[in-house]
Image (tube, rainbow, N blue to C red):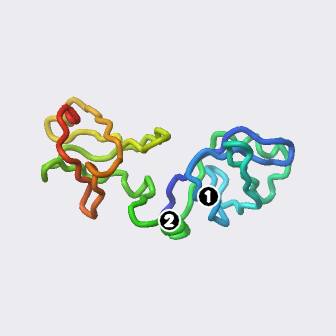
Amino acid sequence: MRLVEIGRFGAPYALQGGLKFRGEPVVAHLERVYVEGHGWRALEDLYQVGDELVVHLVGVRSRELAEPLVGLRVYAEVTELPPLEAGQYYYFALMGLPVFVEGVQVGEVVDILDAGAQDVLIIRGVGERLRDQREFLVPLQAPYVRVEAEGIHVEPIPGLFE
């Protein structure tokens, strides 16, 4: 079993135990989630309220029962995640991948920032760059970034890794 973090619970919503969900929209395709410190919980209902997704868990029927879940991490089993279209990736699948420029490894992906219009890779340098713990921000945007099986290839752009 391999769990991956897909989000966190936000503030309670209304009085019937709903929780705002901040994270991967893939939660809408799952029957259950693993809640930090509470184990597996079945999803009873999900719906949009404005720009926010509200989640109801089986057995959480009041605001008082929802409040202790605020801020907790929510996980899913990798094998239960729906397949993605070509060219789309789950964040967890990119974490730890080496990053290459002209065939030379310059770093590895340590995090991904959801910047709205585009995702941004946070890359920690290797070799000389690792000693000073520098991090570089690279938009995960075609055509100058290619995700391949062995890692992420970035076309050399002046100043990007300086």
How far is the residue under mark 1 from the one under mark 2?
A: 12 Å
Residue under label 1:
27
- Residues 64 and 86: in front is 86
Residue 69 rendering spot, x and y as whole percentages: 70, 44
* The disc label shown at residue 156, or none: none
Residue 116 is left or right of residue 94, and the answer is right
* The disc label shown at residue 78, or none: 2
Residue 66 rendering spot, x and y as whole percentages: 77, 45
Q: Residue furthest front?
A: 143
Q: On the image, which quarter does residue 20 sit in?
A: top right
Q: Residue at x 65, y 57 (%)?
A: 39
Q: Residue at x 52, y 52 (%)?
A: 5
Q: Amino acid at mark 1?
A: Val
Element class at badge 2? helix
Residue 153 rendering spot, x and y as whole percentages: 23, 52
- Residues 44 and 38: in front is 44
Q: Residue at x 53, y 66 (%)?
A: 81
Is 2 situated above or below 52? below
Residue 16 is left or right of residue 20, and the answer is right
Label pair 1/2, CB-CB below 8 angstroms: no
Q: Amino acid at mark 2?
A: Val
